[in-house]
Amino acid sequence: MNILIVHAHPESKSFSGALRDTAADFFKSSNCNVAISDLYSMNFNPVGSPRDLKETSTVEYFDYQKEQLYGIKNNLLTDEIKNEMAKFLKADLIIYNFPLWWFSVPAIMKGWFDRVFAMGFAYGPGKGVYSTGTFRNKTSFLCITTGGAEFSYKESGVNGDINKILFHVNHGMLNFVGMKVLPPFVVYGPSTFTEEEKKSKLIEYRNYLSKLNNIKPLFY
């Protein structure tokens, strides 16, 4: 089994980093192949622009989606993007590991989606969406940390239901391209944890990973 962990946290010693390492160690111990895209360490550029291509089809007007399609058809995407696409294509399971910032993914991860899930690669002409999407053979889930406590992310909490907060990622990014999306693993407020609580949560995460085949997908 091939695993890809797309990780977005600027501090390697963060609890988000510990979750990344826990997943990597778990799957390696199960004889899986594990690749990690540590976006901050890679200095990944999140900005989609003409620089994504070795050359564009026109210099008069830049249409990002059309240029992505042109780049795919003519093998003109930069190596940075092609390398991420290759890792993604190889993976059976993709874990998106990040802290919840402003109720969404960090900008560097949003840029990964913008640039890697390119028109002509993840969607577009000849490719379906959702249940007919291109990547129906892949499974994915979010592993996130929050700043707030769990009660604040309930339906009645001040922040609202965490599943509604994450819907635009789970449904609009992952499920949109056909992937099977599992419920997220959420760690609420790890900055307040004791060392024992951190250890306990990492054990809980390993248990979650050990049961992936038996977890019901969110959408279909």
Image (tube, grey):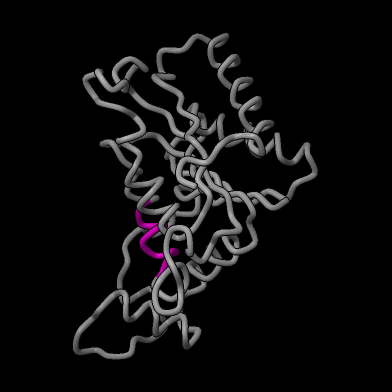
Quick check: 47 left or right of 14?
left
Indicate whether residue 40 is drawn in magenta: no
Q: Quadrant of residue 48?
A: bottom left
Q: Is residue 85 above or below residue 75?
A: above
Name the spot of residue 84 as percent of width and height, x first. Answer: 53, 62
Please tell me whether the stretch drawn in magenta is mainly helix, strand or loop: helix
Quick check: 10 left or right of 58?
right
In-front residue for pair 109/179: 179
Name the spot of residue 107 as percent of width and height, x first. Answer: 32, 49
Q: Is residue 24 above or below residue 199?
A: below
**Residue sitting at 54 percent across and 44 percent down?**
95
Name the spot of residue 83 as percent of width and height, x first. Answer: 56, 66
**Residue sitting at 19 percent across and 89 percent down?**
60
Magenta region, residue range: 110-118
Quick check: 205 left or right of 32?
left
**Residue sitting at 33 percent across and 90 percent down?**
57
**Residue sitting at 51 percent across and 66 percent down?**
134
* Numbered marks: total: 0
Name the spot of residue 112 as percent of width and height, x first. Answer: 41, 57
Q: Is residue 200 above or below residue 48?
A: above
Indicate whether residue 114 is drawn in magenta: yes
Q: Is residue 159 above or below residue 125?
A: above
